[in-house]
Amino acid sequence: MVVGENDGSIEEFNPRSGEMLRGFGAKDASGLHSFVALAFPSDHSGVIAGFPNGAVLWDMSGGQPLRQITSEANVFAVAASGDGRRIATADLSGVALWDFDAVRKIAYFRHPFDVRAVTFSPDGQTLASGTYVEGSIRLWSLRSGKLTHRLDGHESGVSALAYPPRRHRQQPPRHHRERSGRLSLERLPP
């Protein structure tokens, strides 16, 4: 388990014993050390720390930054694709999709309100983003770059999103509206 603390330190713990395995002070290139989020690329190359102005991939073994992206907007959340080659950063007006190997922005998905949550589907084909003020979730096709679904009906802001691991998905995804108008999710589309 990895913990990002307010003092800018990243620490890795053994979740069974509670023993701290390693730790280091982390800052982005501008000297900021206040985290907004942590994410893991599935290739276990390190940990991605989201900062207010971007994201940094840190080598956990040596505590050194491996790659950094700089965002023009305040970042509220980060997510790593399953292959670790793309990351998403959520900000006040949408979600930026980055090619993390080339360290460049490859797409931007606009929202009318601030985005506080973002995640990739397990198959890496869909990006889900959630707005805090509006309380909606948008699903974006990463192949076409187009909005495929909009899930409304949340009574308060969306502050976190996660897909279940693939092995837990047994039925095709579906969603429906109950008579009350509230959205009921059985499974998110892949």
Image (cartoon, rainbow, N blue to C red):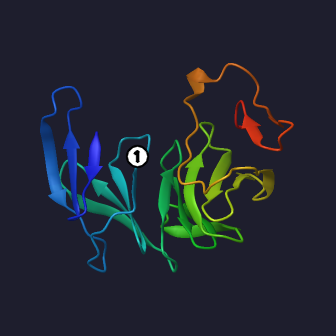
Q: Is residue 29 shown above or below 124?
A: below
User: For this view, does 116 lie left or right of residue 178?
Assistant: left
Closest to the observer: 53 or 113? 113
Say which amino acid is labelled 1. Answer: Phe
User: For this view, does 31 lie left or right of residue 167?
Assistant: left
Q: Confirm whether residue 131 shows in the render.
A: yes
x and y percentages locating residue 110 in the rendered image: 70, 69
x and y percentages locating residue 57 in the rendered image: 35, 58
Q: The N terminus is located in which quarter?
A: top left
Q: Which residue is mark 1?
A: 40
Q: Confirm whether residue 100 shows in the render.
A: no
Q: Give the residue at the far front of this rendering.
A: 180
x and y percentages locating residue 167 in the rendered image: 57, 21
User: For this view, does 181 lie left or right of residue 153?
Assistant: right
Q: Residue at x 31, y 61 (%)?
A: 66
Q: Is residue 106 shown above or below 162?
A: below
x and y percentages locating residue 79 in the rendered image: 50, 52
Q: Residue at x 55, y 55 (%)?
A: 117
Within-10-Å neighbours for mark 1: few <14, some 14–19, many 20+: many
Q: Residue at x 65, y 51 (%)?
A: 127
